[in-house]
């Protein structure tokens, strides 16, 4: 509350007291009380019942009460004690602001007598307020040239208390420049003033901090403070000064343009505009002025051009600083430019050889290099070296020259060319380097003989081979180049059975293929060793040789020869004796035969081809022993005729027969009696006559069949001769290699064989020989699909699957050469053979695998061959080769193709270990032919248990 308002309220109270006093004088008695301020609510003011002459209990009966006039009620009556008490907090400063004496008037009405009593309550002051300043902080500005004795008014303090509790004195904090003087105003207030006792210097102290304290004299003493900040205002009375008289800095030459190199700093002890300093160059040469710039406000020296130690390594200049009043200072700036490794070495190839012989001696010069670095010191010191482990080295020649020479002998066959990287590195930090690439080709010399791919060779050939048949092929490689690597082949001179080896075998000098010049006979010699030589075309030529072992394989070309019984020279037949008393199994005789072939072709078996009395004799299959099959009877004829056949196991089998005559008699006289009839019979018996009849019928049939074939051949020859033997080309008409034939109802791709054939007119039946076969493809056959059906060519020629061909043709006495394309068809005779590593696969999987998990990868192939070949090991063509894989009788798995020839088995349902521990999956691979072939494999899959089931109690409770 402001003092003016408090003053008005006091006037109203005084007026109210005057009016009450008038009424009091009219018939009332005035009662006086005195209480200190700030009493608590309910505090006793006085005994109003006693002062009214009443008992406390009479206050209520007589209707004694305080008459209120609308203001806040500060007091109340306590009917029990009869006392006047406070009704709330009483603040003297609030009720009687500015009054020396504070009295509160109230009226008490006694209703039964209708009488009013006046009560005056005096409120005594206590020291409950401290002095205070309206502004807690004050700033005073003084010029540093202000005269001593000048006064500066300070704000005064306020204290709402009165008397000694009010403001009594001021006090200033101790200092050396100011004092405090207190002036008393006409209104009685005290006003403090700040007096300057000593001259100010802003450069010495720019701000002075003072504390003004106001105090009262109450108990306890209360104080209030205000902070005074005296700011000394500057005047320009000082010159700038540099921190250093000379500035030195060293900078590398590769600093970027615009880099701050140095900060020159001049300070002015003045402030504000008086302390502002401007920088400028006092002395600088033209070269430095193009490189450096001085900031006039900040004093920083920065580059505006590139530094180069090689052009100038030192700069000297002078700068000055000036304030606004014209005061100035000077300083010298020295800048040293340091060399940095900013120039890489330079490598110049002054002499170079692009090629060098591989047998060049060590130290052969390849190139001469000149190395230079524009930097100085360690930055200009260069080291040269060759990267990688190469057979070269660098040698210091003269000055900055280096020679690149060979360090070892070179070998073109190991490395035909080199990419040499010469690196020149200086000793700077970081070092700089330059790489120079030199390409060097190594020229070849004939220093390597041809080398065969094998240490020795083995070859096999069937006897009775045709002339010109290919035996084997040898290959020799020469790692040299060009003519030094061109290899020719030859056979070492040797003889075989008195004849030169060259009459048996020849070799193609370019390809190394060996040919048979005559048929070989296994019975004459079974193996042959010869030396094959390989020569290169270098100068001088180098050669090497390898041994080749040629093994002649036996063919079934010899029929069995019967050694016993020997055929008599006089035309008679041998007689064997069998007594009538012989038991079953009695050895009558033994047929002994040999076969000049070997192996299976020489395995002989014996059988009884014909007997005059079947069932009487038996022949051992492997021994040739002729034994009685049953006991001899008297009814058996004395003369028994047996025909025993001996057959080998070759292909086709060959056989021989022998006729045995067995005399059945118990004694020698019986045999002699019949000898006349046994020796040289005058006429053949009935069995011999039957044999002759059969042979005659067969001969007649063969003659008739041959006659029909000859007629058909003559008719076809007239039409086809003009095409086979044309005067312009003289070529045979062939079957196109792209032709297709149907075999067993299956469309198959015909494979082509190309042979050179010679047809001569020396006989009507000419043979085709094969001196140099040229196979367009290779047919892989199995026993299940070996067929001897020939494929018909145009004309009267027939060619089968083997290497033997016969052409029947009639022509004039001359010969020509032609190529016969031979077509061999393929049938779907190979089942889909799954290329599995085992018949049964076992797989273990966890039961919680997600659907679509791949279990195992399989590969199913068919050995057939076709146009669209997607499975490499299938010899069937077309749809015979396309394989389809199926999973049989299983709904939890399916087969998927994920790449060529490969399939994967994946899950399509959840696996439950608790239901099924093991799954047996059968996979079938079948081709797509009309008569599909297939094969199957089994996969056994074991399910692994995972913890996916919680424990379950047998009883719920």
Image (cartoon, grey):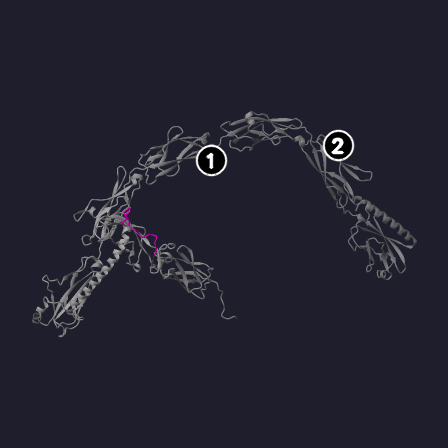
What crowding class fits label 2: few (fewer than 14 Cα within 10 Å), some (14-19), or many (20 or more)? few
**Which residue occupies the foreground of this view, 251 or 142?**
251
First reached walking from the N terminus: tag 2 or tag 1 = 2
Is residue 922 located in the magenta-colored stretch of the structure?
no
676 relative position to 742: left or right: left
Q: Position of residue 762 (x, y in %)?
A: 21, 50
Mark 2–mark 1 distance (CA, rounded to whole Å): 71 Å
Residue 489, by quadrant, is: top left
Position above or below: 4 against 176: below
Q: Is residue 300 left or right of residue 934?
A: right
The secondary structure that dominates the magenta segment is loop
Does residue 569 lie above or below 385 as drawn? below
Asked which secondary structure carries label 1, the reply is: loop
Nearer the observer, 477 or 952: 477
Q: Nearer the viewer, residue 10 or 265?
A: 265
Q: Residue furthest bottom?
A: 634
Rendered location of residue 241, percent (x, y): 62, 28
| Residue 7 x %, y % | 83, 46
Q: Residue 29: which numbered mark, if any?
A: none
- Is residue 90 in view from this perspective? yes
Residue 729 within the magenta-colored segment of the rendering: yes
Q: On the image, which quarter does residue 392 sit in? A: top left
User: Is residue 796 shown to the viewer in this render?
Assistant: no
Q: Position of residue 396 (x, y in %)?
A: 38, 31
Under tag 2, what secondary structure? loop
The residue beneath circle 1 is 430
Question: Which residues make up the magenta segment?
Answer: 725-741
Question: Within 10 Å of the Cα at label 1, are there few (<14), some (14-19), or many (20+) other Cα atoms?
Answer: few
Of labels 2 and 1, the one closer to you: 1
Q: Which residue is mark 2?
A: 150
Name the image quarter holding residue 716. Answer: bottom left
């Amino acid at each position: 509350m402001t003092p003016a308002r408090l003053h008005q309220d006091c006037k109203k109270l005084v007026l109210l007291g005057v009016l009450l006093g008038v009424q009091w004088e009219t018939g009332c008695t005035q009662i006086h009380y005195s209480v200190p301020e700030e009493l608590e609510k309910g505090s006793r003011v006085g005994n109003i019942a006693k002062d009214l002459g009443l008992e406390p209990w009479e206050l209520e009966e007589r209707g004694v009460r305080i008459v209120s006039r609308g203001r806040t009620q500060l007091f109340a009556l306590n009917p029990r004690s009869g006392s006047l008490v406070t009704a709330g907090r009483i603040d003297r400063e609030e009720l009687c602001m500015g009054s020396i004496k504070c009295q509160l008037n109230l009226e008490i009405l006694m209703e039964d007598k209708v009488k009013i009593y006046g009560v005056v309550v005096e409120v005594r002051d206590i020291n409950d307020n401290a002095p205070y300043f309206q502004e807690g902080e004050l700033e005073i500005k003084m010029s540093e040239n202000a005269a001593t004795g000048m006064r500066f008014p300070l704000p005064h303090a306020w204290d709402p208390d009165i008397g000694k509790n009010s403001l009594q004195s001021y006090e200033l904090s101790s200092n050396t420049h100011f004092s405090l003087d207190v002036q008393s105003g006409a209104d009685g207030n005290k006003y403090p003033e700040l007096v300057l006792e000593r001259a100010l210097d802003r450069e010495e102290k720019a701000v002075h901090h003072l504390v003004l304290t106001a105090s009262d004299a109450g108990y306890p003493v209360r104080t209030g403070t205000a902070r005074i900040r005296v700011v000394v205002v500057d005047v320009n009375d000082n010159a700038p000064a540099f921190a250093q008289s000379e500035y030195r800095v060293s900078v590398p030459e590769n600093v970027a343009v615009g880099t701050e190199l140095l900060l020159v700093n001049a300070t002015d002890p003045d402030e504000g505009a008086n302390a502002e300093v401007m920088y400028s160059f006092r002395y600088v040469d033209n070269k430095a002025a193009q490189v450096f710039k001085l900031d006039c406000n900040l004093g920083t020296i920065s580059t505006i051009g590139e530094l180069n130690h090689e052009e100038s390594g030192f700069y000297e200049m002078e700068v000055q600083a000036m304030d606004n009043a014209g005061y100035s200072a000077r300083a010298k700036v020295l800048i040293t430019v340091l060399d940095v490794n900013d120039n890489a070495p330079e490598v110049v190839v002054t002499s170079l050889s692009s090629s060098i012989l591989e047998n060049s001696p060590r130290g052969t010069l390849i190139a001469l290099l000149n190395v230079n670095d524009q930097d100085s010191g360690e930055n200009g010191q260069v080291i040269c070296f060759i990267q990688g482990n190469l057979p070269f080295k660098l040698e210091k020649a003269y000055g900055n020259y280096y020679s690149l020479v060979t360090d070892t002998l070179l070998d073109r066959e190991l490395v035909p060319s080199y990419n040499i990287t010469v690196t020149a590195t200086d000793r700077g930090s970081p070092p700089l380097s330059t790489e120079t690439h030199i390409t060097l080709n190594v020229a070849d010399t004939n220093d390597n003989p041809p080398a065969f791919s094998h240490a020795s060779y083995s070859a096999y050939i069937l006897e009775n081979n045709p002339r010109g048949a290919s035996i084997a092929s040898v290959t020799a490689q020469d790692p040299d180049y060009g003519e030094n690597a061109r290899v020719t082949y030859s056979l070492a001179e040797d003889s075989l059975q008195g004849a030169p080896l060259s009459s048996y075998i020849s070799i193609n000098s370019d390809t190394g293929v060996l040919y048979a010049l005559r048929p070989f006979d296994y019975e004459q010699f079974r193996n042959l060793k010869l030396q094959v030589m390989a020569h290169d075309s270098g100068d001088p030529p180098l050669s090497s040789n390898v041994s080749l072992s040629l093994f002649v394989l036996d063919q079934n070309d010899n029929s069995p020869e019967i050694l016993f019984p020997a055929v008599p020279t006089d035309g008679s037949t041998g007689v064997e004796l069998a007594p009538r008393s012989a038991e079953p199994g009695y050895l009558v005789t033994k047929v002994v035969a040999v076969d000049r072939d070997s192996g299976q072709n020489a395995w002989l078996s014996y059988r009884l081809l014909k007997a005059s009395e079947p069932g009487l004799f038996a022949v051992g299959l492997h021994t040739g022993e002729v034994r009685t099959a049953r006991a001899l009877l008297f009814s058996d004829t004395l003369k028994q005729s047996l025909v025993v056949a001996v057959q080998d196991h070759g292909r086709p089998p060959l056989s021989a027969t022998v006729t045995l005559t067995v005399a059945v008699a118990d004694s020698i006289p019986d045999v002699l009696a019949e000898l006349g009839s046994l020796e040289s019979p005058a006429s053949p018996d009935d069995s011999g006559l039957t044999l002759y009849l059969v042979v005659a019928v067969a001969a007649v049939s063969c003659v008739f069949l041959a006659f029909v074939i000859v007629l058909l051949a003559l008719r076809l020859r007239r039409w086809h001769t003009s095409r086979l033997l044309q005067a312009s080309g003289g070529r045979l008409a062939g079957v196109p290699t792209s032709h297709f034939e149907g075999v067993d109802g299956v469309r198959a791709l015909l494979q082509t064989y190309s042979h050179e054939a010679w047809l001569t007119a020396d006989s009507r039946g000419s043979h085709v020989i094969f001196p140099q076969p040229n196979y367009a493809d290779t047919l892989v056959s199995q026993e299940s699909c070996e067929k001897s059906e020939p494929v018909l060519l145009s004309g009267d020629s027939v060619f089968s699957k083997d290497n033997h061909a016969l052409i029947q043709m009639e022509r004039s006495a001359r010969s020509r050469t032609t190529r016969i394309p031979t077509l061999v068809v393929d049938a779907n005779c190979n089942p889909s053979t799954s290329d599995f590593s085992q018949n049964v696969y076992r797989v273990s999987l966890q039961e919680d695998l997600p659907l679509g998990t791949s279990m195992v990868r399989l590969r199913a192939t068919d050995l057939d061959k076709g146009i669209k070949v997607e499975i490499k090991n299938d010899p069937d063509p077309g749809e015979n080769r396309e394989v389809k894989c199926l999973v049989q009788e299983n709904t939890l798995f399916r087969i998927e193709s994920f790449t060529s020839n490969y399939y994967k088995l994946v899950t399509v349902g959840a696996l439950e270990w608790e239901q099924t521990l093991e799954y047996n999956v059968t996979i079938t691979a079948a081709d797509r032919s009309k008569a599909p072939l297939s094969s199957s494999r089994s996969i056994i899959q074991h399910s692994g248990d995972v913890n996916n089931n919680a424990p379950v109690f047998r009883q719920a409770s």
